[in-house]
Image: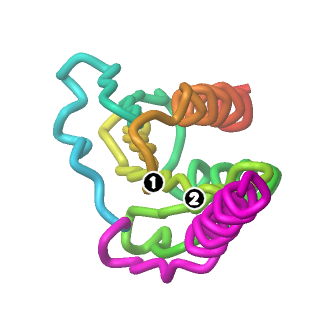
């Protein structure tokens, strides 16, 4: 009886893992940013269950330089791929998968030229579960530090 219970639990875990890894990604669902750049005057940090958002301003930077740097930073982040967007659109969305179960997290970045630099809005969120254990905040803070160094350093 115990063997059947263990096999049942293992079977459920395998099905869940397969679903998380193979679930289709609908770009139009994730390629948005509920914290638009117009919020530059608003508080810069917002957190919620499994999400993190921050808006920064980079004086003296150009939109093209910021997009190029951000694309490099994302490509250097393990298990991260571009989902949608372009510099022309002013928005990029990336998918970063966790180790092991490969839970997908989505990070959308909007960049807009301002009179004295660029504004950059970051929004990271999870797809499955109730908590991301702070990984979206950590990733976004690392990307902000790297972006700031590359475009202003």
Q: Is residue 76 left or right of residue 62?
A: right
Residue topped by disc 1: 128
Residue 136 sits inside the magenta stretch: no
Q: Is residue 34 left or right of residue 143?
A: left
Q: Nearer the viewer, residue 76 or 16?
A: 16
Which residue range is magenta in the image?
1-30
* Residue 109 seen in this snapshot: yes
Residue topped by disc 2: 104
Tag 2 near tag 1, CB within 8 Å: yes
Q: Main secondary structure of the magenta part?
A: helix
Question: Residue 138's quadrant in the figure?
Answer: top right
Q: Is residue 43 left or right of residue 88?
A: left
Crowd tier of the residue under label 2, counting other residues whose Cα lies within 10 Å: few below 14, some 14–19, many 20 or above = many
Lower sequence index among marks 2 and 1:
2
Locate the N terminus by quadrant: bottom right
Residue at image position (48%, 30%) is 58
Q: Nearer the viewer, residue 43 or 21?
A: 21
* Residue 102 seen in this snapshot: no
Q: Tag 2's secondary structure?
A: strand
Image position, residue 153 (x, y; %): 74, 26
Image position, residue 44 (x, y; %): 32, 20
Residue at image position (42%, 74%) is 88
């Amino acid at each position: 009886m115990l063997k059947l219970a263990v096999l049942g639990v293992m079977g459920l875990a395998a099905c869940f893992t397969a679903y998380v890894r193979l679930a289709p990604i609908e770009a139009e669902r994730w390629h948005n940013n509920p914290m638009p750049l117009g919020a530059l005057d608003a508080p810069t940090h917002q957190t919620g269950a499994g999400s993190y958002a921050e808006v920064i301003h980079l004086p003296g930077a150009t939109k093209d330089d910021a997009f190029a740097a951000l694309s490099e930073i994302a490509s250097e982040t393990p298990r991260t791929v571009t989902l949608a967007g372009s510099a022309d659109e002013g928005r990029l969305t990336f998918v970063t998968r966790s180790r092991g179960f490969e839970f997908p997290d989505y990070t959308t970045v909007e960049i807009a030229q301002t009179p004295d630099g660029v504004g950059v809005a970051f929004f990271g969120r999870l797809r499955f579960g109730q908590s991301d254990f702070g990984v979206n905040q950590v990733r976004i803070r690392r990307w902000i530090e790297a972006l700031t160094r590359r475009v202003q350093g």
